Amino acid sequence: MKTKSLLIAILCVVCVMGCAAQKKVKKDKNAKQTEAVQEVKKPVVEEEVPVITEECIMNISLFQQSAKNKQFADAVEPWYQVYNTCPNANRAIYTRGDDIIGWQIEQAKTEEEKAPLKKTLMEMYDNWIKWFGDDAQYPTAYILGAKGLDYCNFFTEDELKEPAYNWLKESIQGMGVKSSLNVVNKFAELANGLYKSNPDKYGEQYIADYQLATDVLNMIAADPTNKYAANAKSYKEYIDNVFAVSGAADCAKLDELYAKTVQSSINDIEMLGKVMKLYRRVGCTESDVYFAAAEASHKLQPTAESAAGCAAMSAKKGNYKDAVAYYDQAIALTEDDEDKANYLYNNAVYAFNNLNQYSAARQYARRSLEVKADQGRCYLLIGLMYAASKPYDDAVLNKTVFWVAVDKFVKAKQVDPSVTEEANKLISSYSRYFPTTEEIFFQPELGKGKSFTVGGWIGETTTCR
């Protein structure tokens, strides 16, 4: 009996302990769930802004003075003290930081020593954006440009440098005409490198990048108050040359990329203008896509660009009278002297070669020279007009046109040495047709060395020889 009672008592204790344990497990489980919920509901604590101490201010002064004097070895310790303890203290931490870390990288002898420094340099730019990205003088877009340039300088093992490409692009888009010329130039170089690595993948992107870079450079170059205007023009010429030989500028490739764009943008004056500008830059103005863009744009809003495109289209179709009329519109609309000189010269060529309007052709050539005086081509063209003329009924007097023609050929090489070879060939060729001594003998007014005015529409005075 006693044994039986003992067993019952033990069983009761075990049951009670089991129930207690179960309750404890449930309680623990519920407690954990409650803690998890509470953890989720915890408010996000904002990062504490570092305190700017007197020591920070003193170290800023120390590294600034040392960096200013290019004593970077002395600047390193105080700079890191500030950067690590009060990175929000002063913008100079970052405007001087790239020089200080850059100096350290240059002093390092192995890649193992350089790697952490290069990492710190990139992180420094991120912190610059974090603490001073809204700065008016050096905004985030500017900082990204500087970061991209330093990446290119120090991460030479990265052949394509896509991170830098992205930072530089964002910088240009943000800074616009305030972009650093070095940033624009390096961006164009990286875009070209990406294209060469995979033309199929980056073809369209490279064309867009080229337009972005040259648009910014054109705006800088066009501003006479911008002290970098001349440099911007030089950079643009370099970028144009690189793009022209890249293969991306192939007219057939452009047509493939932009035919549908023009069709879908028939009422988008801005897009049509961009297409025309691109085609003109790379010399694809004989393309039907260019003509379609020009024609559509001209209907929406006539511009010098659209008028010139319609002129080229008309000339290609043999409608030279229409071509001259369109170029007349372009001449009236353009404010660019280089373009105006070209349009006037083109009209001179069409009026002479295709419409037989010699007097009008000369007038266009002279007007082109008024805009740009060093065009040997205009003098060559006028000389050819004279040589093709017969203002007299007398055969000997008609030979006097070769004197004034040669005068123009000589003038051409005087104002424009680039046409010297062509001018000399024309001089040699047409000098053979001068009147002979015997022919002059029977024309007293043509005595050797005398002054003579060639008549008819020419009306030019020359020396008999």
Image (tube, rainbow, N blue to C red):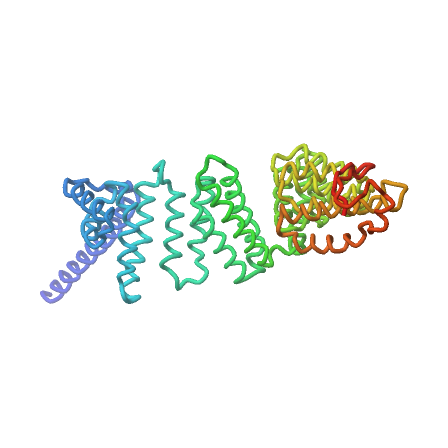
Q: Residue 26: percent from the left, percent from the top?
A: 25, 52
Q: Residue at x 24, y 48 (%)?
A: 67
* Residue sitting farthest toward the right: 393
In the shown orientation, is residue 253 left or right of residue 389? left
State whether residue 231 appears in this view: yes
How many numbered discs sit on the rendered protein?
A: 0
**In front here: 191 or 233?**
233
**In front here: 200 or 282?**
282
| Location of residue 47 by image quarter | top left
Q: Residue at x 85, y 44 (%)?
A: 398
Q: Residue 376: percent from the left, percent from the top?
A: 66, 46
Q: Residue 191: percent from the left, percent from the top?
A: 50, 55
State whether residue 349 appears in this view: no
**In front here: 367 or 96?**
367
In the shown orientation, is residue 175 left or right of residue 265? left
**In front here: 238 or 348?**
348
In the shown orientation, is residue 374 left or right of residue 58? right
Q: Residue 295: percent from the left, percent from the top?
A: 72, 40
Q: Quadrant of the N terminus?
A: bottom left
